[in-house]
């Protein structure tokens, strides 16, 4: 998760608010390419493969444990993490189905990040997230 400084990312992880994409993201992420800015809290990763692995691991463990395993495997302590960000939706990359539901893997462009309500603009950064597909459970 190179979108924010290590201090910001660690503060978010320490807050314990780890989850998959929230309802605000679920409702609005499917308008890829519209240029509309969204705000949401969820797990973001550096690569499509990392967020796909995160979703698959969620079937066997808690979100925090899944993030830790992805970060160990990628040899980057910040490959995936929890973040509250302002972003634009990119391409819908794939769909992943698990026993916890179905998820779209979505490319996003991070614009800014928030910690404790304070927003910080970030350089253009492409990341990936998982968005639950409402009403489409396995």
Image (cartoon, helix red, strand yellow):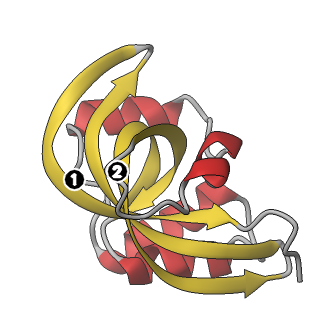
In the current view of this chain or complex, which residue is farthest to the left? 123
Left of 6 or right of it: where is 53?
A: right
Point out residue 77 in the picture as x, y percentages from the top left corner. 32, 59
Point out residue 37 in the picture as x, y percentages from the top left corner. 37, 40
Q: Is residue 108 above or below residue 7?
A: below
Q: Residue at x 61, y 35 (%)?
A: 16
In the current view of this chain or complex, which residue is farthest to the front? 34
Q: Is residue 72 above or below residue 11?
A: below
Left of 15 or right of it: where is 2?
A: left
Residue receiving disc 1: 2
Mark 1, secondary structure of its residue? loop
Which corner quadrant of the image does residue 116 belong to?
top left
Q: Residue at x 58, y 50 (%)?
A: 28
Left of 99 or right of it: where is 109?
A: left
Which corner quadrant of the image does residue 123 belong to?
top left
Mark 2, secondary structure of its residue? strand
Q: Residue at x 23, y 40 (%)?
A: 4
Q: Quadrant where the N terminus lies?
A: bottom left
| Mark 1 or mark 2: whose residue is earlier in sequence | 1
Label for residue 88? 2
Left of 5 or right of it: where is 22?
A: right
Point out residue 80 in the picture as x, y percentages from the top left corner. 41, 60
Q: As rendered, which of 40 and 81 lies closer to the eye?
A: 40
């Amino acid at each position: 998760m190179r979108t924010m400084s290590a201090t910001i990312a660690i503060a978010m992880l320490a807050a314990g608010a780890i989850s998959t994409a929230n309802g605000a993201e679920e409702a609005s992420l499917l308008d890829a390419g519209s240029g509309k800015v969204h705000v949401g809290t969820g797990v973001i990763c550096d690569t499509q493969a990392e967020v796909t692995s995160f979703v698959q691991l969620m079937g066997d463990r808690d979100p925090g444990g899944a993030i830790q395993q992805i970060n160990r495997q990628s040899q980057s302590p910040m490959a995936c993490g929890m973040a509250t960000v302002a972003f634009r939706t990119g391409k819908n990359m794939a769909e992943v189905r698990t026993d916890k539901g179905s998820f779209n893997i979505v490319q996003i462009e991070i614009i800014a990040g928030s910690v404790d309500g304070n927003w910080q603009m970030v350089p253009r950064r492409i990341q990936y997230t998982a968005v639950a597909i409402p009403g489409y459970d396995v």
